[in-house]
Image (cartoon, grey):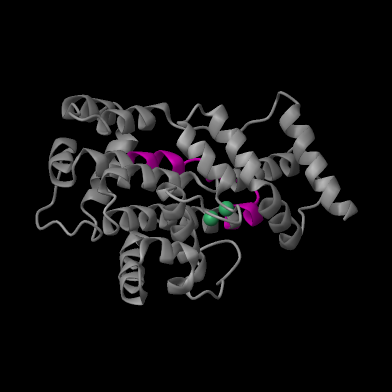
Amino acid sequence: MQKDASLLDTIKAYMASGKAVLPVFSATSLKIQREAAKAEPDTGVIERMIICDPSLTSQILRISNSAFYKGLQKVSTVRAAIVRLGNQEIANIAILVSQKKQFKAHEPFVRALMQQLWRHSVSTAVSAQWIAHRCGLKARAQEAFTAGLLHDMGKLLILTVTDAVKRNGTLHEMPAVVLLSEVMDTFHAPYGYALLRYWNLPKAYCRIARDHHKPEIAKGDDLMAIIRLADRTTNSLGIGLRGTEACVLAATPEADYFGLDEIALAELEIKLEDAKVFW
Ligand SMILES: [Fe+2]
Ligand SMILES: [Fe+2]
């Protein structure tokens, strides 16, 4: 318990120091998402924002040509990628590519945990998007994708800070994985909320980060139900920080909320296999 308090105190002191280097959110990817979410998005604006960033451009072309999108012909320009996949899908890829850059650490131990967290975040995003489409909530699919990607950012914050305090010598020994997991499990929701507020992201994403482990889903809270089901799905497949969590998905309140049965959820598992291109 003492050890637990000291890791947490070290994390808190670093964040309060005013010198903390925290994860950032790409302003460009948020602008792309806002344009794509308009009733009549301007494809030219989205294209220009992407081609200003050569690394984003090359990643978008690579992913657009991957098996996940199963195109027959290779696309070689951003414009062609937008035409094939649509503005919203391109906006999702832009957020993925820019967020992935935040999952970096000096310590191999932290890096390995971040890798698991990245896989969990991406898979939850893809699951959330699939659930929205499947359950007649197509208009919310992009929002679901982003909310899924960002729901556990509190864990990224804790890992980033742990890496920093180990590197600057404030933390002498790397904590045991059990201890670090306990701290992440207990504090990632409020820390994630604070981080997303700090990034100035829409309230819906902040709320998901803060409340996705609350005991119950409020009636009519479709986005929360989507993210919770997506989160359970990825955890039940062992795509997360805690190994495989035994769970009969079709028997969960979240699956019941949407009336999804074993057959539908098996389709989602297949979709997640394809999503490994984002790992
Ligand atoms: Fe979580
Ligand atoms: Fe999660």
Q: Which residue corresponds to the image point at 43% horizontal and 73% vertical from the top-left?
A: 250
Closer to us: 87 or 165: 87
Quadrant that contains the N terminus: bottom right
User: What percent of the width, then of the height, locates residue 101?
Assistant: 47, 41
Name the dominant secondary structure of the magenta segment: helix
Determine whether 262 is above or below 28 in the image. below
Q: Is 90 inside the magenta-drawn segment?
A: no
Residue 106 in sight in this render: no
Residue at 76% x, 26% y: name it.
17
- Image coordinates of residue 245 in percent, x first then y, are 56, 71
Q: Image quadrant of residue 82?
A: top left
Q: In which quarter of the image is the C terminus?
A: bottom left
Asked if one can make out residue 98 in the rendered structure from this viewpoint, the answer is yes
Residue farthest along the left direction in this orientation: 73
Most extreme residue toward the right is 2
In the rendered image, residue 109 lying in the magenta stretch gets the answer: yes
Query: At x 46% / y 37%, what residue is drawn?
Result: 204
Q: Position of residue 260 (x, y in %)?
A: 35, 68
Quarter location, residue 161: top right
Where residue 21 sits: x, y (%)? Answer: 63, 31
Magenta span: 94-112
Q: Residue furthest front?
A: 219
Foreground: 193 or 179? 193
Q: Left or right of 55: which side holds 162? A: right
Q: How many marks?
A: 0
- Relative to 180, does residue 19 appear above or below in the rendering? above
Residue 133 as seen in the image, left or right of residue 207: left
Q: In this view, does 64 lie to the left or right of 17?
A: left
